[in-house]
Image (cartoon, grey):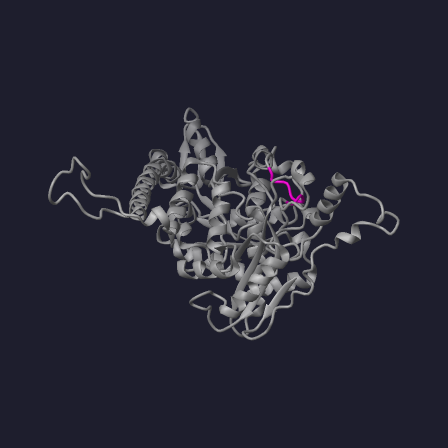
């Protein structure tokens, strides 16, 4: 459950009592000696069933997830799930006999957020989304607390008294980490760690960790590493040898004389310089990736192939929708930011025109600006598209926030004026009343389900109607020995009329400008 406290309230932790070891035994076996292995495994089973915070609402229920023929073989998903940490068995030994049964346990975390007066619903939705992020990163969420105050405390984020209560809660549930639902200043993180006595991280750190796990391509890995270094640079901490000064010049018995001795640099300054050097290398590397991407994009523009970008909130079902439309076989997983690399697939309209569908990286509220800058090249696919398919999770508790968040990022990349098709995905998970509410958010939106196929045909028709018409209208009689031109018109143009005559094939069509120039010699 989520605890909500005011600035002077006391958090209720009475329901966080842990497991009752005595409950593992019935009255008949209490007086008998217990086998250590049975005791360990029984306690592991009870702990594995505890999930105090509850399943995060931003993640779909496992019973509704299905991978059909449209999703392909999903080898990437199997590879990603091939190595998992094992929950259940504790590494905190109560008996020396447990040594042989220890396993690497999942990280237990407690979430903490601050919300102003009147925005409790937004605060709870944000905290549950943070829980989904933590679960995706590989942690077990033990509890979450919210504090009502006008502004976060500049010293410890939640204030000194609440930080002490948070310390007690962390000890009660046996948490290893505290995650704050914001981007903490370096001083706030250090001060809060000093109070709660466990590791403290923020929302940005969790998102960066997920990106680091899921990045697969060379460009994706470089983008994530650059964002991580930009976040790390102002947060370096030095202690002990890290703060010691190195002697400058040649010192000791063979010194280089006057002017060669001095305090030198601290090790932390050396680390900062190495980070800046690595960031410069990554920026050059990302610039080197740009020509290949621009060449592919220029080729599509030269052939006037329309581009459709699938954008939307993370875990809204963009990759599933791309698979349903094109059988692309793109990785599909019930996790936030499951796919980071851009996927471009070819598709055709009912009348034979070719266009491309591009799956882009998902968005999330309070997306770290480091990631927005690092993934600028990926987001360019949205800005250069002709049509945007904006995918929204219909089953999400706050779809309006999803719409606003994605549209803000779309505006940042200069794509606000592009035609937008709003698609409420996962329509099989909502009832008619919810659909009526969603219709009020976007009256022209489509309801589809990439799982059941509902509304997919209507979405295809809407995309075809929204695609821009070729620029040039031609009337030409193409000789029969130039069948390549007729084929090009069928592939890249819209044929209004076609007749076969004695001199060739008469075509009345809308075609791209380049193809129109090639047909000019046969114009009538």
> In the rendered image, is residue 95 in sight?
yes
Location of the C terminus (image quadrant): top left
Residue 172 figure quarter? bottom right
Residue 282 spot, x, y in % from top left? 34, 40
Residue 41 figure quarter? top right
Residue 81 figure quarter? top right
> In the rendered image, is residue 57 in sight?
no
Residue 25 spot, x, y in % from top left? 82, 49
Question: Is residue 1 part of the magenta span, yes or no?
Answer: no
Question: Is residue 85 part of the magenta span, yes or no?
Answer: yes
Left or right of 278? Residue 126 is: right
Location of the N terminus (image quadrant): bottom right
In the image, 232 versus 163, the foreground residue is 163
Farthest right residue? 28
Farthest front residue? 253
Residue at image location 26% in from the left, 44% down from the top: 246
Residue at image location 48% in from the left, 45% down from the top: 211
Left or right of 408? Residue 253 is: left
Farthest left residue? 258
What main secondary structure does the magenta stretch of the protein show? Answer: loop
Q: What span is in magenta?
A: 84-90
């Amino acid at each position: 459950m989520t605890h909500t406290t005011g600035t002077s309230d006391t958090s209720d932790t009475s329901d966080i009592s842990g497991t009752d070891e005595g409950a593992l035994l019935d009255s008949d076996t209490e007086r008998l000696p217990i086998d250590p292995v049975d005791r360990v495994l029984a306690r592991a089973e009870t702990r594995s069933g505890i999930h105090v915070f509850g399943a995060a609402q931003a993640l779909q229920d496992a019973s509704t997830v299905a991978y059909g023929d449209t999703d392909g073989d999903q080898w990437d998903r199997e590879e990603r799930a091939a190595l998992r940490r094992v929950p259940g068995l504790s590494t905190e030994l109560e008996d020396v006999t447990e040594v042989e049964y220890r396993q690497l346990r999942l990280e237990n975390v407690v979430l903490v957020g601050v919300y102003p007066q009147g925005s409790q619903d937004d605060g709870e939705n944000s905290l549950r989304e943070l829980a989904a992020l933590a679960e995706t990163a590989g942690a077990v969420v033990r509890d979450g607390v919210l504090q009502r105050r006008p502004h976060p405390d500049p010293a410890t984020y939640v204030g000194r008294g609440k930080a002490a209560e948070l310390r007690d809660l962390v000890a009660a549930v046996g948490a290893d980490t505290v995650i704050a639902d914001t981007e903490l200043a370096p001083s706030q993180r250090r001060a809060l760690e000093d109070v709660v006595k466990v590791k403290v991280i923020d929302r940005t750190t969790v998102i960066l960790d997920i990106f680091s796990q899921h990045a697969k391509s060379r460009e994706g890995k470089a983008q994530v590493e650059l964002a991580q270094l930009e976040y790390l640079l102002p947060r370096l901490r030095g202690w002990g040898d890290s703060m010691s000064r190195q002697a400058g010049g040649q010192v000791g018995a063979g010194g280089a004389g006057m002017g060669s001795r001095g305090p030198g640099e601290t090790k932390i300054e050396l680390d900062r310089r190495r980070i800046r050097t690595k960031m410069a290398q990554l920026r050059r590397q990302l610039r080197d990736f740009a020509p290949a991407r621009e060449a592919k994009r220029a080729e599509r523009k030269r052939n006037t192939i329309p581009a459709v970008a699938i954008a939307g909130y993370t875990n809204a079902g963009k990759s599933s929708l791309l698979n349903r439309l094109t059988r692309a076989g793109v990785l599909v997983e019930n996790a936030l930011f499951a796919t980071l690399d851009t996927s471009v697939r070819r598709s055709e309209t009912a009348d034979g025109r070719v266009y491309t569908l591009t799956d882009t990286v998902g968005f999330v509220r309070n997306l770290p600006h480091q990631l927005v800058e690092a993934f600028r090249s990926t987001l360019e696919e949205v800005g250069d598209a002709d049509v945007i398919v904006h995918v929204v999770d219909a089953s999400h508790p706050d779809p309006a926030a999803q719409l606003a968040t994605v549209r803000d990022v779309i505006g940042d990349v200069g794509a606000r004026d592009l035609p937008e098709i709003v698609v409420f995905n996962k329509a099989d998970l909502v009832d008619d009343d919810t659909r009526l509410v969603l219709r009020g958010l976007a009256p022209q939106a489509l309801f589809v389900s990439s799982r059941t196929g509902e509304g997919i045909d209507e979405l295809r028709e809407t995309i075809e109607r929204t695609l821009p018409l070729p620029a040039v209208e031609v009337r030409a009689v193409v000789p029969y020995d130039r069948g390549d031109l007729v084929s090009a018109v069928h592939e890249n143009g819209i044929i209004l009329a076609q007749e076969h005559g004695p001199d060739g094939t008469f075509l009345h069509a809308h075609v791209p400008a380049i193809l129109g120039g090639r047909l000019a010699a046969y114009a009538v």
